[in-house]
Amino acid sequence: MKLMGSLRIRLATVFRSSQINSEMEDELSSHIQHRADDLERSGMDRAEAERRARIEFGGREKFKEECHEALGGNFVESLIQDLRYAVRVLRKSPGFTIAAVLTLALAIGANAIVFSVMNAFILRPLNVPQAQSLYALWRPDVSDAHESYPDYLDLRDRNRSFDGLIAWNMVEAGLDTGHDPSDVWVYETSGNYFDALRLQPYLGSFFHASDEHGPNSAPYAVLTHAYWHTHFRNDPGVVGRVVKLNKHPFTILGVAPPEFHGTILFFSPDFFVPIVNHGQLAQDDLNARGSRWVFMVMGHLKPGVSPAQATADLNSVGSYLEEAYPKDDGKMRFTLARPSLYGDYLGRPVRAFMTGLMVLAGLILLAACANLGSLFAARAADRSREVALRLALGSTRRRILRQLFTEAVLISLVGGAVGLCGSVLLLRGLSAWQPFARWPIHLAVNPDANVYAVALLLTLASGFLFGAVPVRQVLRTNPYEVVKSGSTGRIGRRITVREVLLVVQIAICAVLVTSSMVAVRGLARSLHNDFGFELQNIMMVDTDLSMAGYSGDKVPPMQRRMIDALQAIPGVESVGLADTVPLGEGQNGTTVFTDNTSDLRSSNAAAEPILFKVSPEYLRAAGTALLSGRIFTWHDDKDSPRVAIVNREFTRRIFGSPTKAISRYFKMPDGTRIEVVGIVEDGKYGSLTEDPQPAMFLPILQSPSSSTWLVVRSNRDPQQLAAAIRSTLRQLDAGLPFYIQTRYKTLDITLFGPRMATIALGVLGVMGGLLSITGIFGMAAYSVSKRLRELGIRIALGAQRSEVLQAALGRPFKLLAWGSIAGLILGVLASRVLAFVVYQATPRDPLVLGGAVLAMSLLGLLATWIPAQRALRIDPLRLLREE
Amino acid sequence: MTEQAQLLPGTLDLLILRAVSLGPLHGYGVLLRIGQISGNALLIEQGALYPGLFRLVRQGLLKANWGTSENNRRAKFYELTVAGRKRLREETASWNRLVTAIGSALAAQPEEV
């Protein structure tokens, strides 16, 4: 009852505040009138009596405020009052307000972006029910999750820890819906996939474990919602339709729910088909235990089973498999991994990168707060007269501090809102962006409630943080001193916290500037490096002949026809063919053994080279230099002895040195002896930063593959050439989907990490630079305005311009110099870390060092320009007159 | 004026309740009444009365109504509520206990200890 009553009064005071105000006014006036009546009766005249009564009453405004406080509705009302006052004050100094809001908008925006990317990549699990208990099987010895299909079946049936273990693999397939063939990305999944993931169809139905009856027995397909939306225009009649994948008919059963984008981040499929039909979409043998082509095996842990228990369980199945199949299952050790980023494979770099970014973004926010704090402190000092006056008129210090905090929080809220709006726009763009046209890769980073909450929290926290800087100053204000002497300005020579903050900030900025330059230079240089193949004047066509129904013996003649047809295009110098290319998509590897090894289990392997199956012309077309021996010919076919060309690293690993490698033999896992007929230079195969890897090239006729990359060397204009290639291949087979791009374009994936790192560093560097500018500017402007009188006197006494500048800006410049030097040194050290991401990132580069120094000096010049102009334009006469 | 005592913190509310308990009063009247019943021995800043009055109204110990004063002016009159009367009784008792205790403590002689 009492609570309700007081609540009612509180609410009423908010809503009826004007009425209460006027009543209070009436009551206090009435008191004074009564007192004046008494005084008048004692012989005073009316005017004098009223004056006396008012004096006796005391500080009327103060008592009124206390009355409001006593009524309890005061908080909201004075908040509104404070806000109104803050808006008025801020509107009076638009320059300061805009600078402050922009600084914060940048800092909060940067944090919101980085956090929402982190949220999307790391914090948010896959979009399936109970994602917390979903784990993938990981093979720590080979650092991937691949399994063979028979091993998967054993793992699925023999483990006791998982509530349904699923397997899936991705392939590209040619889709024929009746017109215009296109290629689609397909998840081949085990029959229990949707049931084990606990998903319900959006439309129609899913396939189930009961649909699997051996190889190619389940010709069913499920569409993703996105593909159904874009390619079938949400047509519900799609259920039951038959489409052709790689010329094999598949019946569409249904559509997956819209929020489900597959079981790994980034890589969204178009179709799901049963994995038992793998033979129709790719060449791997479903029943080969040694062929580890299944991309991932994963499942929900049963309730009550801990990850450690599950790992032990899997390893016992693993040791059973090692014993039962010693030839195929060399080492079967398992750990559990989070599937969303493919365990640590993507997870570690992404986490490291995001953590680094988050730390940098946090530092930027701190720097912004430090800047705004010193700007606020400077303003508070400028407003010391106002503060003193208010204190003298009976305002409490608490009230004044609250006013200052209101201003700070108001600025931070506006800044945060602007920053958040900007970041939401940017994130929308990022989410719609497809970094590689060739791949179905999406970065869904749209902000969610978490992001908004964090942004609000950061905004409020930073508002209070920089609002707190001038607190001590206000608490120490002595109203009488200030009003008397006009200013509390004391220019001390001691080093203040503010200056240390500024130096730290400049140092951070210099680190960012240096490392972004190192990254840019490294990136630029890495494109002119020797990769073991050439980039100039080369066009790549990639396809898979199985997408148009070619298989077995039909593949090699078609490949030969394609090569011949492209060779006939005017201006084409040479055409090579390979199953995969270096720095393209994933590479194939195999184990090899020395010639005298007889026990061919994988633990006895001498090396695990990367394997390319190539046509005779490939090396010439790709621009890979043959060091000794011969290249392949079309006579290196099934009927002639097996031969190989290997790189130097291969000869080093298998034969000890390149000189005696020619004509020697090594063994494949199946026991085939292969003769080395040529040696080529080393190259980059998987990434630009890798150590030298062994690689071997086999003649495509001796180990056929339907996966086809055509390397077309020509110095014709790429667009014309692409058009000519397209029409030539269409004439050959109109039903074959393919993709044409320049050799440079194929590096997009390889360069994605370094590029992202460079862009991120560059953006952060620019932001750091902007913040340093506001920081130095704030400090320089403040120091000039504080010392206007001193500078005026100096000028009046005949000081030169350079001396004035020295006096006014010497200190900011000294700070800039110290910060820059520290930052440069740190930046050089940080570049070693950068070298892991960006190929050939080295700070020992005159261009980098010179650029960084130039950038920092430019920054200093920019920041001190306006204060310097102001210092030089001082008119001593006017200044002295004013004071 | 020098003979006037400073108010102890918290005692103003008690004085207001006591003053109003003798009949409805407006603000200035409360001040006069306190002066009258305390023999003008207490120093009260005039304006300081009002936050106290508002506080007591908010606590439901006083109720206020606008009326006309003996000077024929509009004024707000305060009177005790039932809760106010009860509170006055309790506060008076507790004050008396305090005074007795402090008084006897101050009057204590060495031999009594």
Image (cartoon, rainbow, N blue to C red):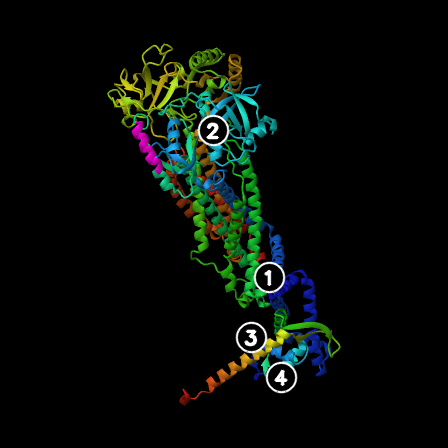
The CA span between labels 4 and 1 is 37 Å
Vertical order, A451 against A48 (above or below): above
Q: Pointer 3 indicates a residue of which chain?
A: B
| Discs 1, 2 touching: Cβ within 8 Å | no
Whether marks 4 and 3 lie on the same chain: yes
Q: Nearer the viewer, mark 1 or mark 2?
A: 2
Q: Pointer 2 indicates a residue of which chain?
A: A
Mark nearer the N terminus (4 vs 3): 3
Does residue A462 appear to the left or right of A332 in the view shown?
A: right
Q: Residues within 10 Å of mark 3 (few under 14, many from 20)?
A: few
Q: Disc 3 marks which residue?
A: B10
Camera-side residue of A805 and B78: B78
Residue A210: give its label.
2
Q: Is residue A498 magenta?
A: no
Whether marks 1 and 3 lie on the same chain: no
Q: Which residues are magenta?
A: A313-325
Whether marks 1 and 2 lie on the same chain: yes
The CA span between labels 1 and 2 is 68 Å
The CA span between labels 3 and 2 is 83 Å
**Circle 3: element type:** loop
**Circle 4: element type:** helix
The amino acid type found where label 1 is placed reads Phe
Residue A414 seen in render: yes
Q: Pointer 4 indicates a residue of which chain?
A: B
The CA span between labels 4 and 3 is 18 Å
Q: Disc 1 marks which residue?
A: A75
- Measured as percent of width and height from the top left, residue A605 is found at 29, 25
The amino acid type found where label 4 is placed reads Ile
Q: Disc 4 marks which residue?
A: B37
Identity of the residue drawn at 42% across and 27% down? A527
The amino acid type found where label 2 is placed reads Ser
